[in-house]
Image (cartoon, rainbow, N blue to C red):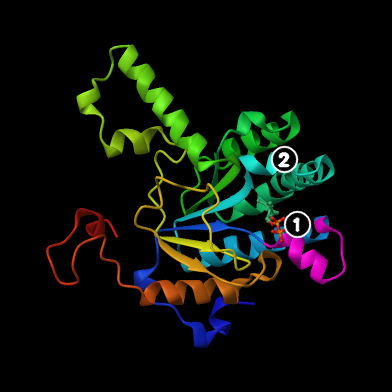
Amino acid sequence: MPLNDFPALSVDSSRLPRHVAIVMDGNGRWARGHGLPRHEGHRRGKDSVRAVVEAARELGIPYLTLFAFSNENWHRPSTEVSFLMQLFHRYLITETKRLMKRDIRVVALGETDRLPPRVRQALAATVEATRDNRTMTVAIALSYGGRQDVVNAVKAIAQSVADGKLSPDEIDEQTVARELTTGGLPDPDLLIRTSGELRISNFFLFQLAYTELYFTDTLWPDFRERDFLAALAAYQLRERRFGAVSNGADHPLRAQN
Ligand code: FPP
């Protein structure tokens, strides 16, 4: 359904978040609620991914991150992990043409070397094929953990210090931000988590410092354009102060937004 068919949820296109990150949760509960096996929830969750990517693209949101698989998710039953890997593979194979047509660049976040070779190769092919697309960036976090991200950044910085390329005095927030898997992406302005869970669950830890958090009871497989617009409308009602006062001197982070 075209976005302008939701007039009640109109959003101000001049004040959109630059980067929206989403923790897509509730696939299993959606399936259980419909008397279906868990994997049916994941399968339907893929349709929500397409709907939200297209809505964000149509609205002109330049960055969208999808938390698709956490480091902790490796501990799920092997049949579920295999199904998810197959689903990601299928998504990458079938969706790349569509992403190209819409000028969408895909980047991968996380410890993607832990993915099965087939998924890794499909991911690398999609990233490569879409690398020059400019209208929007979709970041897919696969095998991602916020703490591991920070640990990996610390290791890289320690190595630069050990190699004599960097002095400890030179390390600042930008140094750390650059070494995170998100290096090069702006911090999210808005985090959406579906399914009523009120946790960060080891998602972006450093990156969420000033992010507006939006939680909804809607389960991910039911989350579509209307729900995305509702999240954006709620975001636009927030006053972002970045730790400063309402009408006080501008904080440098506010100037970026
Ligand atoms: C969390 O729901 C969801 C996941 C672990 C997988 C996310 C994957 C998708 C949405 C599929 C498509 C994604 C892409 C990028 C093509 P859960 O299983 O933890 O649900 P529960 O908490 O209700 O059990």
Q: Pick whichever of labels 2 and 1 is earlier in the sequence.
A: 1
Looking at the rendered structure, the kind of residue marked 1 is His
Q: Quadrant of residue 60?
A: bottom left
| Residue 144 within the segment the image draws in magenta | no
User: Label 2, label 1: how many angstroms apart (C-alpha)?
Assistant: 17 Å
State the SS at label 1.
Answer: helix
User: What's drawn in magenta, residue-wise?
Assistant: 26-38
Mark 2 residue CB less than 8 A from any atom of ligand 1: no
Q: Position of residue 230 (x, y in %)?
A: 51, 77
In the rendered image, which quarter is residue 153 located in? top left
Q: Is residue 3 left or right of residue 234?
A: right
Question: Can you identify the residue that label 2 sits on?
Answer: 75
Which residue position is annotated with label 1?
42
| Quadrant that contains the N terminus | bottom right
Tell me the crowding category of disc 1: few under 14, some 14 to 19, or many 20 or more residues within 10 angstroms, Cα based.
many
Relative to 217, does residue 162 appear above or below in the rendering? Answer: above
Q: Please determine whether, in this image, residue 174 is positioned above or below residue 87.
A: above
Examine the rendered structure and indicate whether residue 52 appears above or below residue 236. Answer: above
Which marked residue is nearer to the observer: mark 2 or mark 1? 2
Residue at horizontal 50%, vertical 83%?
9
Please state the total of marks drawn on the protein image: 2
**In the rendering, at what x and y percent does residue 177 appear?**
36, 39
Q: Is mark 1 within 8 Å of ligand 1?
A: yes
Q: Residue furthest bottom?
A: 8
- Where is the C terminus found, in terms of image quarters? bottom left
For mark 2, give the secondary structure: helix
Inspect the image, locate mark 2, and give the three-letter code of the amino acid beneath it: His
